[in-house]
Image (tube, helix red, strand yellow):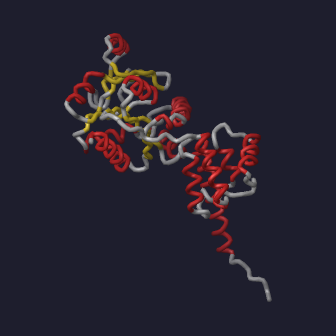
Amino acid sequence: MSERRIPEVDRAAAARRAVERRRERAALKRDLTMRVTAPQVVAKRAFDDADSVCGSMRITDFLLALPAIGVGKRDTILSDLEISPVKRLGGLGVRQRVSLLNWLDTRFPVQHPRAGRSRLLVLAGPTAVGKGTVAAHIRENNPEIHLSVSATTRKARPGETDGVHYYFVDDAEFDRLIADGELLEYAVVHNQSRYGTPRAPIDKALAAGKTVLLEIDLQGARQVRAAEPSATLIFLLPPSWDELVQRLVGRGTEDEAERSRRLRTAKVELAAQSEFDHLIVNEDVAAAAREVVELSEATAR
């Protein structure tokens, strides 16, 4: 019996699928390295579907993609968990899956929402993730939520209005706001401009029973948590690291040096997501805004 030959068209399609799958795994590894995706999420997706991109990833590649895991640590982890280095995530046995998830929870703990959160919501996330766009959507569609307006020393971008998007002030006025204790938080962002949140409008809105949303950076979120421990902290994530880079490049408001500086900052910001009460992925602005509003409704009960 002659051997069946695979049609050339099938060979080409198979080759394209193989290339695409390698690209998807490479993107997934970048997301793990940059902490855009939690390793527990990738592991659970792999366990649910062994044929998925997550399921087809080798355990060795998975571990090396995690922050601060090198070849030596990888081999020690595999030995301790009794997992063969030739295994793929989707092919792990039941005991190995439990052991891996337990190790991940110990090494990369996941923040769980805390009880007793207040109506003061803080929305933060890495640069170019779309915090301002999500906040603007909430401003336009949910007038019951008071959106705090920050003061900044940076220049207004095209389309930005003073008093709506930011209070644009000079350094002297910003110094006065600090000296007079009129800012709830303030920080230097990207080693350049200063940003701060005026305290009076927030106190007035909370006293009136409103929910207040602050759209600020990581430094500011930490200061708010220190000043108001009951504040609800929300971290906005990009769908992927590649998408975050594309958003930053695509908006065209920074030169190459500034983009590089902001991406370095984004890596640091993404590493801090476990400090927050809730994580929301901004794949669709309306959907992300709806999730924030649902959280605000939950805190108001």
Q: Is residue 231 left or right of residue 202?
A: right
Please tell me which residue is depicted at 46% across the width and 30% down the height of the picture. 218
Q: Nearer the viewer, residue 30 or 219?
A: 219
Whether residue 136 sits left or right of residue 266 in the image: it is left
Q: Position of residue 60 (x, y in %)?
A: 71, 50
Pick the front one: 138 or 155:
138
**Residue 33 place in picture, x, y as percent:** 61, 42
Where is residue 182 drawn, in percent x and y? 31, 17
Q: Where residue 137 sits in the image (x, y, percent)? A: 31, 43
Asked if residue 157 is positioned above or below residue 64 in the image, the reply reads above
- Horizontal side of 81 relative to 164 (left or right) equals right
Q: Residue furthest right?
A: 1
Residue located farthest toward the left when viewing the structure as drawn:
208
- Residue 128, quarter of the rendered image: top left
Q: Is residue 216 above or below residue 30?
A: above
- Identify whether 187 is placed above or below 84: above
Residue at 49% x, 26% y: name it. 190
